[in-house]
Image (tube, coloured by chain):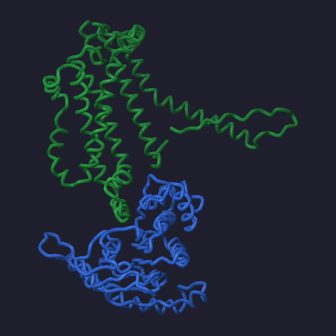
Amino acid sequence: MTIVLEKPAPARSGPGAPPPHDDTPARGARALRALGRLSRLTLTRSVVVLALFALWELAPRWELADRTFLPPFTEVAAAWWELALDGRLWENTEASLVRSGLGFGLAVLCAVPLGLLIGWYRPLADLLNPLLELFRNTAALALLPVFILLLGIGETSKVAIVLFACTWPILLNTVSAVRTVDPTLIRLARSMDLSAPRLLQKVVLPAALPTVFTGIRLAGGTAILVLVAAEMVGAKAGLGFLINSSQYNFAIPQMYAGIITISALGLLLNQLLLWAERRLTSWRPQPRG
Amino acid sequence: MTAKINLRAVSKAFPARGGRESVLALDGLELDIGAGEFTVVVGPSGCGKSTLLDLLGGLDRPTSGEILLDGAPVTGPGLDRGIVFQQYALLPWRTAAGNVEFGLEATGTPRRERAALAREHLELVGLGGFEDRHPHELSGGMRQRVAIARSLAYDPGVLLMDEPFAALDAQTRESLQDELLRIWERTGKTIVFITHGIDEAVYLGGRVAVLTSRPGRIKDVVPVELGEARAAHADLRSSPEFALHRRQVWQLLHEEVDRAQELEREAVAR
């Protein structure tokens, strides 16, 4: 979204002074129209979410849903605020952020270079492809018991499962991105006698970046999903732990507060990655504002 | 005139589908190209024109025979030759200046010099002021100008052009042809220009080499002498001298085009 809000031009300073711009009324009208467009856009984007919250608030109050299991939204918000004030919310969010950040970051650092190599050297791709297909089609969470058995229930197994789950979307997208780089660009680089590392760095990586980022965004969603599940199985902190332990202790509003925090975190991460993607691929024609 | 490029009995065969026998794309090409000469290679589609360019560029090796560049055999790609591709081959994430600098980075030119050279060469192709535009913001003709500037900037002795204007509309093509001739006169590069257009070949070429349909052989080399006519006619293409040369090349090519179409029909029917 790139709407520039122009400040309305200042009013005339004196009766004799010429207007600062001849087109002052036009500019003002344009600014007003932009403001109108912006508020309309905000409204369209938030109206469904607001309706959901309203339904959540009213359903228990009108006894359409059991109040014990689905407390009204305001009660959940109050519980969230309480958790935020006594520091438990941040403590658990921090634990989750560190684990998912570490696993996700390591996955990006490993999978992108690896994907470039696999995509570039065809024999390597042919060799590894069956293995990649096997791992990609194995649900990461099915391997959670294996990770716990091998790495214990501490931080290592949680970071490792996030790393594992995030690797595949990034790796597979990078490999296919390298495969689909415009062959003319490769011919150009070869005609200039570029060495293979230079060619990867200057042509293949930038050309592959948009598709690589699709994989990274997918991995971002996976990171949170897998982590929360891992934290529900065995952990002493984290948002998954908060949700699970709240449920065990019958602190239902707190449970919902944890859930809301996770979805907000997921949204935030996706926005962050979108922003990074736009920054890095700003040369591409933007399809829409 | 000293020879810049010599083709000595150059043949190129490709493994056919199924791998049983190979298909001969080029057969015993013999051609000497002088330094600073503008040579156009024209031939029917599928006659191996682009294969020839790949061999000259060092992107591929001949099956037999050899290509000499300044007397030494071509063994691989190098910055002594610049290729201009039909599809422009611009890096879409780089600006016009960034694309021109791409070749200069390969030669190891210092950063400040690169920027100056990029500006100078964009100006040479008539794109002064467009340094910061990305390829998607430029028209097809402008993109090809950037590609030409890129190939000129790192100063190769030879410019290899693979149907560079084929994707452009007629007006843009004509203006780029004039531009190319102007640049050639100014820079004195040896140019090998590949096309399937007879008009383009006669208009640009100092000499026009006509290839036969597959396997590609050199059927004839037509010297184009339009020196006086170029000066005398504002519209060279409708001058009698131009028509004469055009007819000559057309007759040579005509039979080959028929034969190429016959071959194509046979290939499809099989």
Q: Is residue A251 left or right of residue B142?
A: left
Left-right relation of A95 to B269:
right
- Left or right placement of residue A131 versus residue A9 in this view: left
**Hue used for the chain lettered A:** green
Residue A139 x/y as whole percent: 18, 33
- Above or below, B195 relative to A280: below
Residue sitting at the far right: A16
Q: Nearer the viewer, residue B31 or A54?
A: B31
Tell me the residue at 43%/64% (across/down): B88
Q: Residue at x 44, y 70 (%)?
A: B156
Residue drawn at x 13%, y 69% as measured from the top left: B18
> Do we see residue B214 in this rendering?
no
Q: State whether residue B41 is above or below residue A138.
A: below
Q: Please indicate, yes or no, whether residue B70 appears anywhere in the rendered image.
A: yes
Q: Position of residue B201 (x, y in %)?
A: 44, 82
Tint applied to chain B in the drawing:
blue
User: For residue A203, which quarter of the picture?
Assistant: bottom left
Q: Is residue B230 left or right of residue B5?
A: right
